[in-house]
Amino acid sequence: MTDSRPTLGVGMVGYAFMGRVHSQAWRSVASVFDLPVRPVMAVLSGRSPSRTADAAAKLGWAAVETDWKRLIERDDVQIVDICTPGDSHADIAIAALAAGKHVICEKPLANTVAEAEAMAAAAKEAAARGVRSMVAFNYRRVPAVALARRLVEEGRLGEIRHVRAQYLQDWIVDPEFPLVWRLQKDKAGSGALGDIGAHIIDTAQFIIGRPLTGVSALTETFVKERPLAEGSSGLAGEGGTGETGEVTVDDAALFIGRFEGGALGSFEATRFAAGRKNALRIEVNGSAGSLSFDFEAMNELWFYDAAERDAGFRRILVTEPDHPYAGAWWPPGHGLGYEHTFVHETKDFLEAVAAGTDPEPSFEDGLRVQRVLDAVERSAAAGSGWISL
């Protein structure tokens, strides 16, 4: 049977870790969800002709470009998916929007507030012409996180008073781990703060529906020199050069904050929590109840109803058909994984583009997170002084 849905050609820039999961989403989304449009994986862009060609063949892309500007110029590309380090996000996104291409951009939106402001302004101007954009905070699309937001919106927690957010990883605990691009400020913008701290900032604001209004912070770099890796990619496992280079980003960031409406927040982002692989944790306490989530058990949400004082927290297995996103997949009890969050965000993005509405999180939402990241850095540099947003 012929698929009569209109198609949207996708051009993706970057093919490493994020490129792989985004490719999985583009391949899968139309077979899982009933969409009004069908994405076509038109072209992949990367700097190395041979590596890009190999990645395209493996990941399912029809063509290859070695210059992202040529990708944007192609008539078979209507969507540009940006999966590069943060230092190139602004240039690619602004050019793509100016060319009338819809854009989905990996987080954090940019490396600086000025870049993020320029991107948000370009997105606003493009939206007036019917061109859509979204920043890819995929953890919003975890079914349990989306259910947590629903519970807050329904008033099940009452007045929100506390938010505790952590993102704990351990992948650079070894001081011999090489100096990859994520450890270089000119490419990554910041370290654990921007890489994983951006996620908990956005997730916390998403769940309670309120922005942060001020922060006070500390940051630390535990390993200040690391081995240089051979090759341009700097991937773990490549042979070393015997030389070392300076780590120019934070290894860990801690900060407290206050949300609009008065709720208090505490945040911790570190890549030095030995034994923690991808522990994004959120707990929200309100006057009528609490909820708790840990991505290392991503199909579970823990909920406490203060009206049932003797019951304690109860475990909700978020796999029922009426739970966000879950009904499109497997029977109840058959859990989802990390890659499914990207399928969900791709689905939401395509539906918004087809409907002519602005998808969320918007570039303006990404700018809001960028301003928090900047305030945290400024607070830490000043010795943990309070910075208003």
Image (cartoon, grey):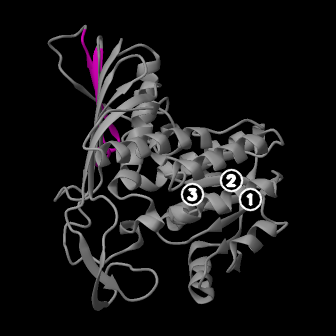
Seen at 16% across and 59% down, the residue is 274
Lower sequence index among marks 3 and 2: 3
Residue 214 seen = yes
**Could you say which is closer to the camera, residue 40 or residue 212?**
212
Question: Can you identify the residue that label 2 sits on?
Answer: 103
Mark 1 vs 2: CB contact within 8 A: yes
Q: Quadrant of residue 155?
A: top left
Q: Quadrant of the N terminus?
A: bottom right
Image point 43% across, 40% down: which residue? Answer: 372
Residue 25: assigned label: 3
Q: Which three-letter amino acid code belongs to the residue tagged 2?
A: Val
* Amino acid type at mark 3: Ala
* Residue type highlighted by circle 1: Ala
The residue shown at (30%, 74%) is 246
Disc 3 element: helix
Which of marks 3 and 1 precedes in the sequence? 3
Between circles 1 and 2, the one closer to the viewer is 1
Q: CA distance from mark 3 to mark 2?
A: 15 Å
Residue 188 part of the magenta-drawn span: no
Q: Quadrant of residue 75?
A: bottom right
Rounded to the nearest whole Å, what is the CA distance between mark 1 and mark 3? 21 Å
Q: Nearer the viewer, mark 1 or mark 3?
A: 1
Q: Name the side, left or right, on which 84 lies relative to 251.
A: right
**Mark in the foreground, 3 or 2:** 2
Q: Is residue 349 above or below residue 265?
A: below
299 within the magenta span:
yes
In the picture, measured across the screen, residue 9 lies left or right of residue 34, that is: right
Residue 96 is labelled as 1
The percent coordinates of residue 386 (x first, y second) are: 32, 33
Q: Secondary structure at mark 1?
A: helix
The range drawn in magenta is 289-306
Name the image quarter holding residue 159.
top left
